[in-house]
Image: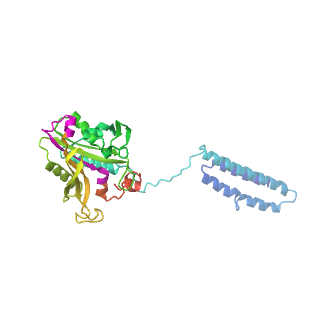
């Protein structure tokens, strides 16, 4: 019986040392230590031994079981530590179709800015950029905004100090362009703007604008309407119409609010346009002569128009998005649609 135990131990320990994976070790454990394993037969053979030999053989069998169990644990630890043969964790099936990797894309706002630049670029407008942090002079005085105007209040503008602000409009770029370039000027200025608005479905403290400026001899309101009509028809749909409503802006005179016919109902009236058939598009007008005088342009010789469009609102109008906050929540379920 002792010879048999010695042979079992030699065979088991050799197989354990040669095992190359956790799965092989588990098979050996079941084979030798399982309920129906080799030691079950050994214990059954004890019944046929003389009474005086049973304790001695039983103790030897238990020692061997512990030795085999310890050997299995040691080899398992070595495999987990990377000392044994590498165990494949993934089975590669070359017959399966490949998995296309997820590739990022531009944010819908960025896509829209590129689209706007393309449309106005084909009408001869160049693109200009300026700093988000600018002088209050460029944001107010140079745009003919008087000291007592409500927009200069701290409730409507972010101030660093009395002379430096976070720009509340990209019109500051137009001032910088005119101060460094004589007429003719034909430029758009897209970018971020900032106002301390309460965040809701249609407002945010940071949003995007594109301002446009055209200065030359003989520029009229007819040119302004033609440019905005061509842009709207290219941006929305070919049959879109726009209208001007009288308004007031300090930096333009005359000034207008620009409406575009609702793309959903074609101007007939629906819930999107509040049954009016029109959706507010932006603000525009002829540049005030005081602005020209401030940048050194001859207001008697040159005229020009300016306009401002909310890029976030344009995206919402084009795609029927009802909440501006969706653009900034980083929800991939939403962003991946564009």
Is residue 274 something one can see in this rendering? yes
Q: Which residues are magenta?
A: 290-314
Decide which of 317, 283 is in the foreground and name it: 283
Decide which of 258, 111 is in the foreground and name it: 258
Decide which of 147, 265 is in the foreground and name it: 147
Task: State yes or no: residue 301 in magenta.
Answer: yes
Place of residue 330 in the rendered image (x, y in percent of width and height, measured from the top left) = 41, 51
Q: Which of the 4 quarters of the picture holds residue 45?
A: bottom right
Query: Against 5, is 175 above or below?
Result: above
Q: How many marks?
A: 0
Quadrant occupied by the N terminus? bottom right
Place of residue 251 in the rendered image (x, y in percent of width and height, measured from the top left) = 23, 44
Q: Hey, which residue is sitting farthest front in the picture? A: 148
Task: State yes or no: residue 196 in magenta.
Answer: no
Place of residue 206 in the rendered image (x, y in percent of width and height, measured from the top left) = 36, 47
Place of residue 296 in the rendered image (x, y in percent of width and height, measured from the top left) = 19, 34
Instruction: Judge from the rendering whether residue 126 lies leftward or rightward of residue 53; answer left or right.
Output: left
* Point 30% across, 62% down: residue: 272
Quadrant occupied by the C terminus? bottom left
Is residue 129 something one can see in this rendering? no
* Point 35% across, 39% down: residue: 165
Instruction: Judge from the rendering whether residue 86 lies leftward or rightward of residue 213; answer left or right.
Output: right
Instruction: Judge from the rendering whether residue 23 lies leftward or rightward of residue 38; answer left or right.
Output: left
Q: Which of the 4 quarters of the picture holds residue 316?
A: bottom left
* Point 60% across, 54% down: residue: 23
Q: Hey, which residue is sitting farthest right in the picture? A: 52
Q: Which of the 4 quarters of the picture holds residue 266?
A: bottom left
């Amino acid at each position: 019986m002792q010879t048999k135990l010695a042979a079992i131990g030699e065979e088991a320990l050799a197989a354990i040392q040669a095992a190359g994976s956790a799965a092989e070790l588990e098979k050996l454990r079941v084979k030798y230590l399982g309920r129906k394993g080799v030691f079950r037969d050994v214990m059954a053979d004890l019944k046929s031994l003389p009474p005086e030999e049973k304790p001695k053989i039983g103790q030897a069998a238990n020692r061997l079981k512990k030795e085999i169990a310890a050997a299995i644990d040691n080899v398992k630890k070595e495999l987990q530590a990377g000392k044994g043969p590498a165990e494949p964790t993934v089975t590669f099936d070359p017959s399966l179709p490949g998995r296309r990797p997820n590739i990022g894309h531009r944010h819908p706002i960025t896509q829209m800015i590129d689209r706007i630049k393309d449309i106005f670029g084909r009408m001869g407008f160049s693109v200009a950029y300026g700093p988000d942090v600018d002088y209050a002079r460029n944001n107010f005085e140079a745009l003919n905004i008087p000291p007592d105007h409500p927009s200069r209040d701290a409730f409507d503008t972010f101030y660093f100090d009395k002379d430096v602000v976070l720009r509340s409009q990209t019109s500051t770029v137009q001032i910088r362009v005119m101060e460094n370039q004589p007429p003719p000027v034909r430029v758009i200025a897209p970018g971020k703007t900032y106002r301390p608005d309460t965040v809701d479905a249609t407002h945010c403290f940071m949003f995007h604008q594109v301002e446009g400026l055209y200065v030359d001899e003989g520029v009229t309101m007819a040119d302004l309407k033609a440019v905005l009509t061509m842009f709207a028809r290219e941006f929305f749909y070919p049959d879109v119409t726009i209208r001007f409503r009288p308004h007031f802006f300090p930096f333009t005179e005359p000034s207008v609010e620009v409406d575009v016919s609702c793309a959903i109902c074609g101007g007939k009236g629906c819930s999107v346009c509040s049954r009016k058939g029109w959706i507010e598009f932006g603000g525009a007008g002829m540049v005030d002569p005081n602005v020209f005088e401030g940048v050194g342009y001859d207001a008697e010789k040159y005229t020009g128009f300016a306009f401002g469009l909310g890029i976030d609102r344009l995206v919402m109008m084009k795609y029927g998005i009802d909440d501006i906050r969706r653009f900034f929540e980083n929800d991939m379920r939403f962003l991946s649609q564009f």
